[in-house]
Amino acid sequence: MAKKEKLPLKTVERILREAGAKRVSKSATQAFAKYLEQLTAHIAEEAGNLAEHSGRKTIKEKDIKLAKKRVK
């Protein structure tokens, strides 16, 4: 059974086109989607850790901003 993408491929393709690509292959779209999913999962995990460290259950905007800086 194939893994279901979390991000819609049409949305990922649109991001690539808005970045200047005239044409985007399906495999390039899938590869970029996989990368984005991994990156966002790491940021979300780090933001959750930051919220927990601060004694909160709720992830706040400041957690996301700090997590983005910490995850490269």
Image: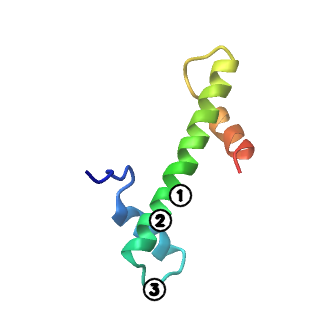
Mark-to-mark CA distance, 2 and 3 = 17 Å
Horizontal and vertical percent for residue 21?
50, 81
Comes first in the chain, label 1 or label 3: 3
Q: Amino acid at mark 3?
A: Lys
Under circle 1, the secondary element is helix
Residue 59 visible to an observer of this rendering? yes
Task: Pick out the residue farthest to the right.
Answer: 70
Comes first in the chain, label 2 or label 3: 3
Tell me if label 2 and label 1 are in contact, CB under 8 Å: yes
Quadrant of res 14: bottom left
Under circle 3, the secondary element is loop
Q: Amino acid at mark 2?
A: Ala
In the image shown, does 66 or 25 lie closer to the viewer?
Answer: 25
Horizontal and vertical percent for residue 55?
66, 14
In the picture of the structure, the residue carrying the numbered disc 2 is 31
Under circle 2, the secondary element is helix
In the picture of the structure, the residue carrying the numbered disc 1 is 35
In the picture of the structure, the residue carrying the numbered disc 3 is 22
Which residue appears at 46% of the width and 76% of the height? 17
